Amino acid sequence: MIDVNGYLAVLGVARPTAPTADALRALHRAQVEQVAYENLDIHLGRPTGIGAAESTARIARGRGGYCFHLNGAFAALLTALGYDVTLHRAGVQTTPAAPAGAAGNHLALTVRLDGERWLVDTGLGDGLHDPLPLREGSYVQGPFTYALTPSVAEPGGWRFVHDPRGSFTAMDFAPDPVELSSFAAEHVRLSTAPDSDFVRVLTAQRRDAGGVDVLRGRVLRRIHAGGTDERTIDSADEWYAVLTGLFRLDLTDVDAAGRAELWHRVHLAHRAWEAARQG
């Protein structure tokens, strides 16, 4: 069981009277605007699970997560509100050369509503602001243009193609339903393996109607219709102010020593990144 009313309070959305398309759009927008895509607990050395109850409790206390947490929690919320939700094994490709297919490094959702299926995904960071009808075509949301096509790598599944300005190239998902628990092993790998992007780089992202704010280490970007604004954050105080303000993360449970250690690690990683770029 999840605390539906508590979850909706975080999103700032009234409880829908019926599972409609308009309510689905409102819930999706609120989730990506109010709940950050983030991996701070990995860098704080705090292992997390991906059970829906645990993830919704994280959201209720002012934190976010990545796809397994965010879509897992959102699926539970939608189900509790009467939506017909299916979880799918999916795969995100971060470069054009990456193999297509549902490798299992992502959880995607579809919702069947009034005879139509929708792609619902609050766990792609700079991805969807609104759910998409599961129809082949091109879709514009804010500064990004997306495409949906049938997946060649996953017969019966679909391929979501991101805008060239996005943080990944595409996402394929398989047609068959899966359980949230089936992602547990991949979650452990993504949150512990030295070659995992989640382990290598601390990130926070928050989508809105006009674009997306992205923090990677000390580099803060705002991608919008007019271009991309970028700056490097130079102090720990400003960095934490960005996390708690712009990304709306509650970090009251991180004490002064923990904050100092986290900033030190992020600062060292940034220096190594700069050195690699110059080399």
Image: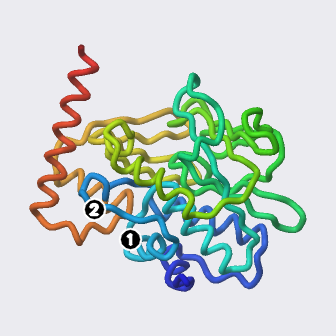
Left/right placement of residue 73 relative to residue 19 reads: left
Residue 140: x, y in percent?
A: 70, 42
Label 2 sits on residue = 46
Amino acid at circle 1: Gly
Outermost residue to the left: 257
Label 1 sits on residue = 62
Tell me which residue sits at (11%, 64%) in the image.
256
Vertical side of 20 occupied by 244: above or below:
above
Tell me which residue sits at (44%, 73%) in the image.
54
Label 1 Cα crowd, 10 Å radius (few <14 / some 14-19 / many 20+): some
Q: Nearer the viewer, residue 144 or 43?
A: 43
Vertical side of 19 occupied by 102: above or below:
above
Q: Nearer the viewer, residue 18 or 101?
A: 101
Residue 20: x, y in percent?
A: 78, 73
Amino acid at circle 2: Arg
Q: Quick one: SS at disc 2?
A: loop
